[in-house]
Each structure stands twice: as C-alpha cells, then as structure tokens.
Image (cartoon, rainbow, N blue to C red):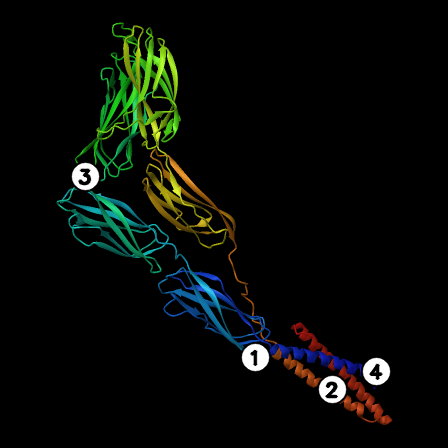
Amino acid sequence: MSKKWLRRLFAVGMVISLLVGQCMTGFAAEDGDASIVVSGDGIYEVETGNTNLVKLQIKNKGDGTAENVHLEPRVPSGISPFRLKLQGGGDLGDLGVNAVKTVTLEVKIDGIVEEPSYSVPLKYTYSSRNGNSHSGTTTIYLKVKGFNREPGFELTDMKLSPETMNPGSSASLSGKVLNTGGHDMYQVELSLDNLTTDGISLAGGFNSKMISKLAVGAGTSFTFPLVASADMAAGNYPVAIKLKYQDEFGKAYEKTNQFYVNVGGVAGRKADLEIRNMKEPGGVYGVNQNFTVSFDLYNKGAVTAKDIVITAEPVDSSAVVPKSASMKTIHALAPGASTHQSFTFAGTAASTSQNYAIQFTVEYTSGGTATTTFKQFAGVNVSNPDKDEDENTSKPKIIVSNYVCDPLIVMAGEEFDLKLTLMNTHKDKAVKNIKMFLTLAEETSSETEKSGNIFTPVNSSNTFYFDSIRPKGTMDKSLRLYVVPDAQPKTYTLTVNFEYEDSKGTEYTATELLGINVKQMTELQIDDFSVPETVEQFQPVTVAFSYYNTGKVTLNNLMIKVEGDVDCPNKSTYIGNMESGYSDYFETTFTPNSVGEVPVSIIISYEDPSGETIEERRDLLLNVTEPFMPEDMEGMEENPPMDMKHMAVGIGILILLAGALAVFVKKQKEPPKSTAESVSDVEELEEEDDLNDDFEEEITEIIQEDNKEGMPL
C-alpha cells in the first residue's frame, strides 16, 4: 500500500471518528432530561376596573427537549376574587434546550376583595424525549392596589336653620358630604340616628338618603327636617349623622358624627366674645389732646353672636370724655370671625395729672333671648399742670409713666419681666412712705365670679416699699412675675395700687391699670411612625399615626400636608378646629417617583388663639431602589432543536464514507494487472484521485457548515 493511500485512509478514519462523536453527542443530548422553570415568585400589583397583564417566562434549563409543555393557574373556586386567563391558552408546545417562551396572564377582579394580596399557584406539566414525565408548581402573588386605603369623607357646611330650636318648634339640619379620599365611595347611605319621640325627631320624610356612587372630590347635599318635643328642657341634644358606604372592593364601612342641636338657647351651644390685641395709648397726653384705644372683638364660640353693643365709658367722666361715638352696635359676628374697633378720647381741663381708666362693656345674645355681658379696661396717662398748681386742690400724684413687658406677649405657665417707671407728677411736693401692691380681679361674663391672681411675683411678696420720690422725679422698679398655667389667652388688666403720704403726713391712694397680653402654650403630640429602610420605585408606602391636642387651647384650621417627590392622593388634608383634650387619626399612602434618597415631609400646621401659624414637621428619607424586574427574555426567538438535523447529516456522511471505504478495500485486494491494463488503471486511478479530492472538499464543507451552526466537534 502506498504512503499516499495510507494518508488518505488515516484522514478518512479521522473524519469518521469526528462525525461519529458528533452524532453520538446529538444522540446523547436527544436522550437528556428537560427541566422547565417558570420565572415568577414575584409580587404583581393589580387594580379593579382594568384587565391586568402579568408577564411570565417559561424556560427549559435542562439538557433535553421538553415536549407538550402545559401551564395552568390554579385558584380555588369561590375563594379568589380574580378571573384568570392565559392568552393563547395553556398549551405551549415543545421547548428545546435553553429555549424561552413568554406568556401573558390576564387578571380581572370580579369578586369581593377581602385581603390585600392573594397567592396564585401555577401548575405546569411536560415530558422529555427520554420518556420521563414531569410536573411542578410555582406561586406568584397578586397585590390589590389601594386595598388598605379607606375612602375618606368630610361633613361640611353643617348648620341648623334656625340656629336654636324652641320646645315644640321645627328646624332644618343641612350639610354636605364631600369625598376627600383617594377612592370612589359606593352605596352611600346617609341617615340620622339617636332620635327619640320625646326629644329630637324627624318632622317628616325619609330618615336616610342613598347615593349609588360618590366619586373622588364630589359631594352631595342633604337636608333633614327636625322637630323638638314640646316638653323638652333647654339644653344641648346630640343627633348622630350616620354614614354607611363601600369601597371599590365591596368592603363596607360605617362612620358616625355627632351634631348638637340647641333647644332653648341658654343652655345650648353659644357664642363667646372676647377682646384681643388691645392697644392702649403710650406716653402722657395733655388736656384736649386726642388719644385712641383700639382692639379686635373675636367670637371664639360655636354659634353666631347677635345684637352686639360695645360701650366705651371713662371711669371719671369729668376728666376724660369721648371724642368719637361711645357706643357701637354690630348686627352679628359669626364663629371664628373678628371685627376691629377703635374709640377716641381726650382729657379735660378738670383732669389732673394721673392715669385714668376707660371701661369697655360688651353685650350680646347667643341665639336666644338671654344677654351676655363682659367688661375690660384700658388706661391712659393725662397731664394737666395748671390743675396741679392749684394749691387748694393740688395733691401729689404717683403714676406709672411707662412700663415694658419682656417678652411683649407673655406665655402662660412661664415667667416674664415687668419694668415700671413710677413718676411723681407734682412739681413742688414730694411723696414718701410709698407702698405699692398688685391685684388682678378678672371680670367674668356673669359678673358673679372673680378669678384669682393671674400674675404672681417670683421670689418676693406682692407688696413693695419706697422711701420717697422727689417732685417731678421718677423711680424704676423691675419685677419678675409668673403667669398661672391655666390662664386663658387674652389681655389682662393688672392693677397697680399706691398708698403714700405728702410732706405733711397726709395719706393718699392711687391706682394704675396696666394691660398684659397673655398667650397660652399650644401642644400637639404626634405618635411616632416609621417607613421601611428601603423601598422600590413606585411601591406604595403607608404612613399612619395618631395626634393629640394636649394643650389648653383649641387649635384652629389644622391641616396635614405631604411634601416630596411622591405621588399622594391627599397631599393636603384639612382637619379644621381641634379642641383641647381631643385626638384624631391620620393615614395616607404615597409612592416615590425617583430613585435614590428621596426626602419626604409630613407637615401639620395650625393656628393658635392669637392667629399665629405653627408647624410640626416630620422629615423622612426614603432609600428608593429600582423596581424588581425578572430577567428580560423578551424578543428572544425560540431555538429549534438541532438534534434531528445533526443526526441526518451525520448518517448521510457515514453512508458515503462507508461506500468509499468498501471500494478502497476492494481495490487493494485485486491482483496485479498487465502493462496495458496498468496504463488503463493509471488513468482510472488519476480519475479516482480527482474523485477523492472532490470527496475531501465536500467533507470539509460539511464540517465547516456544522461549525458555523454551533455543533460541537
């Protein structure tokens, strides 16, 4: 055998070895076991009213083809509120090795949602070509969007017309229900409760009002006719306004608000007027020199004050006289409203150099016939040297020529400094043996009760002593005073009393009136709350807390705001007035829009009785991450199994090689031929060499083609 034929035989053997190994690899792969994996096990948010689409990936991670793959969601009938459907059905056909198929699960909510999230098992079955059958189950979770957010509402424009009922009379209770939450309200039923035949009852008509749907931001008005029993005693009677409704998931709610109906006027809800921000004239005013006293009249009560009469009268009408109308009338002043009033006065020639008091009397009615009265005083320093020079009538006077409060508005329960400048107004006579003491007797509306001292000296008695003050001389005195904690916010009149003597031992007395503006501390206690350390973008975050008015005054116009780069259905919620000792609960949900550190602030603002706005802030810092997404296999084409193709090519090549090898062996066994035959054989061998060369080229092309298609060699 020639070397050339040996080389050819060796090459043919190598090709046969490679192709046989390749075919055996194909057969081994064909006989492998498939392994189906459903990429789920995540949480998918769904909402009512929409067809929600959940994307799932089915992947064959085994080393064999998966045949007859079937996927089916399994939800127990009558338990789940969902209707589930796989687009295109659950039969997915065959999946080759590493092949991926994306399926879409349609989710609709058509039942009553009772839980915030539900588990949905997905069962899958398939078989391998090696004869093995497989089945498995994976679970996904469907979270119902907005389930934990209760629809919110507010009763506004509540009023009784007329404001007060008399026994046996009727009135109309009206108002408006406003949907202030982030969800629609369904099957809304508004009714009155706590009605009795011997008390407040309906005058006729229906006891309830039905609204099939109340959209977010929408409102509906209502009116109920009421009648008071003829033998009712005067007083305040509660009427319960009951609201029943459902959310979009069919969950039922019931809320009750109390509204008090005043019968008889006197013992019921009433107006409560007070004088605020009184401005007294500073300095000293001469005879016929005008000065003005101004203040705000504020209604801090619950109903409108009517037939208001304000009277301004100097205590000594011969020394100080009005220069403007001394009586003013106001028809009505609504709750929470105020009106600014001012009065002008001047000292007369009959006045002497001293401080004169001016009395302001306020009378009004509160829905009934009874009249409420209260008084408040202001003071002014008047100087009249001509009158003081009259030796027969002239006497030394001590006045408070100037006083300063530090701070200007003092806080109840705290200490403050009061600096007084005492002046002897007489130009010739000195005063001596001076005793000064402070008193405060607060006038009440009934004028039958007097309060105790609002101001108490710190580390000293209430009485102070001075040796003397020369004519036209002054003396400074600094006091440290304490305000009792339960003092109501208003301007108090502090009386400074003097007892003193002149050079002859004649005893005199004098009083000075000082206005001290007291402010009550507001205290709003807020429960602690927290948010998760890490949240995903667009994932809802719920914040809930209770808050309490632990101060001694009502908090007006309370409002809760949410600030930050978040979506929130109620970024601004108006609460209204919150009385002392009351508490409430607030809950909101927001979703972050951006990734990274997102600052969010919860701000509670309100006004104190003086009208000053106060804010309580809770600053949060959310660590927001990218939303979780399963491995994106979208757009990948399914890889068809290559085993059959490889097998067919390999078998064809083996048949060709086997035929060529048989011819070669036969040629080698034939006996030697003659010279003529040898010449002919040489020609045939040359032709055979050409055929062998062509055969080698074909083999090479087939191998290269297989390499391009990724077949292992």
Q: In which quarter of the image is residue 632?
A: bottom right
Label 3 to label 4, Cα distance in Å?
A: 132 Å
Relative to the observer, which residue lies in front, 171 or 455?
A: 455
The three-letter amino acid code for the residue at tag 3 is Gly
User: Which residue position holds label 2?
Assistant: 660
User: Which callout, 2 or 4, points at the residue further toward the start of the chain?
Assistant: 4
Label 3 with label 2: CB-CB less than 8 Å: no
Around disc 3, counting alpha carbons within 10 Å, would you say few (fewer than 14), some (14 to 19), or many (20 or more)?
many
Which callout, 3 or 4, points to the residue nearer the camera? 3
**Could you tell me which secondary element the residue under label 3 belongs to?**
loop
Label 3 with label 4: CB-CB less than 8 Å: no
Label 1 to label 2, Cα distance in Å?
A: 34 Å
**Could you tell me which secondary element the residue under label 1 belongs to?**
loop
User: Which residue position holds label 1?
Assistant: 129
* Residue 262 coordinates in the image, percent (x, y): 20, 42
Around disc 1, counting alpha carbons within 10 Å, would you say few (fewer than 14), some (14 to 19), or many (20 or more)?
some
Task: Examine the rendered structure and indicate whether residue 381 appears above or below residue 589.
Answer: above
The three-letter amino acid code for the residue at tag 1 is Arg
The three-letter amino acid code for the residue at tag 2 is Ala
Relative to the observer, which residue lies in front, 514 or 157?
A: 514
User: Which callout, 3 or 4, points at the residue further toward the start of the chain?
Assistant: 4
Label 3 with label 1: CB-CB less than 8 Å: no
Is residue 288 visible to us here?
A: no
Label drawn at residue 265 = 3
Label drawn at residue 479 = none
Label drawn at residue 3 = 4
Which callout, 3 or 2, points to the residue nearer the camera? 3
Q: Quadrant of residue 4?
A: bottom right
Label 3 to label 2, Cα distance in Å?
A: 123 Å
User: Which callout, 1 or 2, points at the residue further toward the start of the chain?
Assistant: 1
